[in-house]
């Protein structure tokens, strides 16, 4: 039997009719959802852009002029 999703706990099971997560037994004739029929994952992985590191302000930005010059 193909993988199926438990209707009680949404746990994914690789086979059989007994949920490995919650122990629920599928009723006879009940057709559980298949994980493969769920929404397909995006074709390309979502790229999480790292935020730009904060830039240290220059002395001019802090003091209006560079006192170290
Ligand atoms: Zn379950």
Image: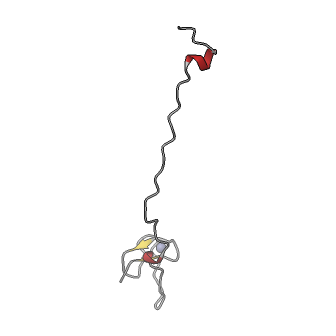
Q: Nearer the viewer, residue 31 or 54?
A: 54
Q: Give whichever of 66, 46 is nearer the camera.
A: 66
Residue in view at x 48 percent, y 47 percent: 49
Q: In the picture shown, does residue 58 fall above or below 14?
A: above
Q: How many marks?
A: 0
For the point 43% across and 66% down, which residue is it? Answer: 43
Color theme of the render: secondary structure
User: How far across and down, in percent of the image, does residue 34 sit?
Assistant: 44, 79
Q: Position of residue 16 (x, y in %)?
A: 37, 81
Q: Is residue 44 above or below residue 21?
A: above
Seen at 48% across and 43% down, the residue is 50
User: Residue 40's x, y, as percent?
Assistant: 46, 71
Residue 19 image point, x, y percent: 43, 75
For the point 53% across and 75% down, the residue is 8
Question: Above or below — where is 68 with respect to 51?
Answer: above
Picture quarter with the N terminus: bottom left
Identity of the residue furthest to the right in this view: 64
Quarter where residue 65 is shown: top right
Q: Quick check: 49 left or right of 14?
A: right
Q: Is residue 5 left or right of residue 61?
A: left
* Residue nearest the observer in this picture, 43 or 30: 43
């Amino acid at each position: 039997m193909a993988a199926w999703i438990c209707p009680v706990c949404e746990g994914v099971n690789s086979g059989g009719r007994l949920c490995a997560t919650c122990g629920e037994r599928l009723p006879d004739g009940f057709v559980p959802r298949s994980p493969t029929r769920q929404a397909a994952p995006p074709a390309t992985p979502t790229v999480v852009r790292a935020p730009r590191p904060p830039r240290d302000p220059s002395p001019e930005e802090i003091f209006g002029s560079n006192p170290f010059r």
